[in-house]
Amino acid sequence: MVIKIHIGVIGAGECSTEIYGIAYEVGCLVGRNEWVLVCGGLGGVMEGAARGCFENGGITVGILPSTEKRSANPFVTLAFPTGMGEARNALIVRASDVVIAIAGGYGK
């Protein structure tokens, strides 16, 4: 069995275009290296990173705060609804080998 490196990306659910671009570039690096991106699955930093990874052939995992898979952004490959709200951030950290926080904040 091949176990891929899991890179967690956390950050605000709403962000500037500049921060979105940084998250996108991080996601591109994750995808190009064939790692797995783990995030909160919503907008802002999470969407930017997931989009970059997805567009570069990577696997994206969204650990969602709600109970609805449909709440994930369109770049999430695997959506896991938790119903845990912000507490789901602990699962993102636990599922990741490394966590990158971009521009502070957290997704809601």
Image: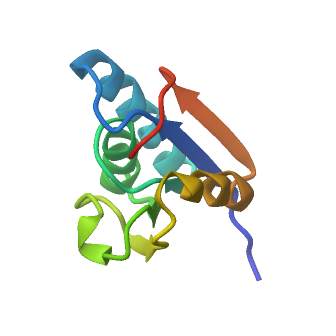
User: Is residue 35 visible to the viewer in this orientation of the structure?
Assistant: no
Q: Nearer the viewer, residue 7 or 28?
A: 7
Residue that extends furthest to the bottom in the rendered view of this protein: 1
Q: Position of residue 95 (x, y in %)?
A: 69, 61
Q: Position of residue 78 (x, y in %)?
A: 42, 73
Give the color scheme: rainbow, by chain, secondary structure or one colour: rainbow
Quarter of the figure that contains the N terminus: bottom right
Residue that extends furthest to the top in the rendered view of this protein: 18
The residue drawn where x is 40% and y is 72% is 79
Q: Nearer the viewer, residue 86 or 12?
A: 86
The residue drawn where x is 31% and y is 76% is 68
Q: Is residue 18 above or below residue 30?
A: above
The residue drawn where x is 46% and y is 74% is 80
Image-based side of 94 in relation to 48, left or right: right
Image-based side of 99 in relation to 73, left or right: right
Residue 13 image-quadrant placement: top left
The residue drawn where x is 31% and y is 48% is 51
Q: Nearer the viewer, residue 60 or 90?
A: 90
Q: Position of residue 42 (x, y in %)?
A: 33, 52
Q: Position of residue 108 (x, y in %)?
A: 38, 46
Image-based side of 98 in relation to 62, left or right: right
Mark count? 0
Q: Is residue 32 above or below residue 16?
A: below
User: Is residue 5 visible to the viewer in this orientation of the structure?
Assistant: yes
